[in-house]
Amino acid sequence: MIKVTQIEKSKISTIDFENLSFGTVFSDHMMVCDYKNGQWQQAEIKPYEPFTFDPSASVFHYGQALFEGMKAYKGENDEVFLFRPDQNIKRFNKSSERMAIPEFPEDLFLEGLNQLLRLDADWIPQGEGQSLYVRPFVIATEPCIQANPSKEYRFAIICSPVSSYFSGAVKVKIEDHYSRATPGGFGYAKAAGNYGGQFYPTQLAKAEGFHQIIWTDAVSHQYIEEAGTMNVFVRIGDTLITNPTSDTILDGVTRKSLIQLAKDLKIPLEVRPIAISELIEASAKGELLELFGAGTAAVISLIETFNYKGQNYQVENDANSYAQQLKKALTDIQLNRAEDQHQWRYKVQQ
Ligand SMILES: *Cc1c(COP(=O)(O)O)cnc(C)c1O
């Protein structure tokens, strides 16, 4: 049983839902659960408010912290849906294992999502591209600066209403010096540090006029791995290609869903490593028809130009693109506008 304390007065009327800046506005409630004495304590849903921690709290020093990102959608009849929440919950615990954080009980996680979304249902904007971004996370809270795994943690879920933003096709730099993740490392975990370490090289690329980085493998820098914090897809001729996941690549829910939808739509698909040389060759022949990133926040983000060692290469970006077909197929399922053949939609209990 989750203990629920409702807010006295909702702040929803103070929010300008027409002008939402991603991740800056938070709903009335949050879920919180602390880990102490070797177990998870009473879970609570309560008004969104600041946390107070000791300056020696382990997370500030050794960075045991990780998160998830998912979205809640409101359908035609005000029904609320999540998309494959089981996948996010499993991945949360896979990340936890790698960061030596105790796993969070799956059923309590799902129960918390249901109760929180029921309570804050008014915060879910309705319509194309509109959703409530759900951010579960866990941090190490033990007041102790010994370099050991913390004995105390805080799990929480906060929610932020988001609206679609049209970002045009972007210019990216293929990074051949810095690395996001290394074999044997924790690139596959949604660990906070993977983001922290990515900001500086991305800042340098932005100063050179690029929007984002395409990461390459840390060993040879010959194969592409991820586009910023998204999985990467490429279309050469008629074939859609994405690289296999590994310990350096995050196993994206969007990626695996697009792979299945490509099969459903009879799009020729290959899952194999993608060499930079192959992209350059295909671009020269005019066969590099699409290049895009895939992830929960933007669903699909188109790339129009990539730069490698100072040279720009064009992507054709076909009007009747696979990206467009796949995005439509995916969002139709998410918003309850299409049959859900694979049982991906999860209806929040109201
Ligand atoms: C979250 C994330 C993705 C995308 O995963 P989704 O489950 O599709 O949102 C891809 N790469 C990295 C590094 C990520 O952190």
Image (cartoon, rainbow, N blue to C red):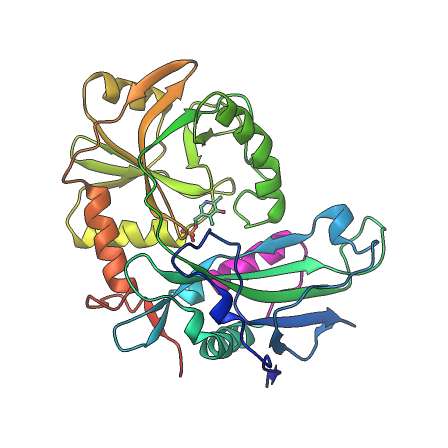
Q: Residue at x 22, y 53 (%)?
A: 328
Q: Residue at x 15, y 49 (%)?
A: 266
Q: Who is closer to the viewer here, 334 or 206?
A: 206
Image location (x, y in percent) of residue 344:
32, 66
Residue sitting at the far bottom: 1
Tell me: 214 left or right of 197: left
Q: Is residue 156 above or below residue 325?
A: below
Q: Residue at x 59, y 86 (%)?
A: 1
Tell me: 312 left or right of 62: left
Q: Who is closer to the viewer here, 229 or 180?
A: 229
- Dividing the picture into quadrants, the one containing residue 45 is bottom right
Q: Who is closer to the viewer here, 17 or 131?
A: 17
Q: Residue at x 32, y 69 (%)?
A: 345
Q: Is residue 87 above or below residue 111?
A: above
Image location (x, y in percent) of residue 29:
56, 73
Q: Which residues are magenta?
A: 88-104
- Dividing the picture into quadrants, the one containing residue 131 is bottom left
Total numbered badges shown on the rendered structure = 0
Tell me: 90 left or right of 35: left
Looking at the figure, which quarter contains the C terminus? bottom left
The main secondary structure of the magenta stretch is helix
Image location (x, y in percent) of residue 11:
54, 71
Q: Is residue 222 above or below residue 108?
A: above
Q: Is residue 279 magenta?
A: no
Q: Is residue 93 magenta?
A: yes
Image location (x, y in percent) of residue 37:
79, 72
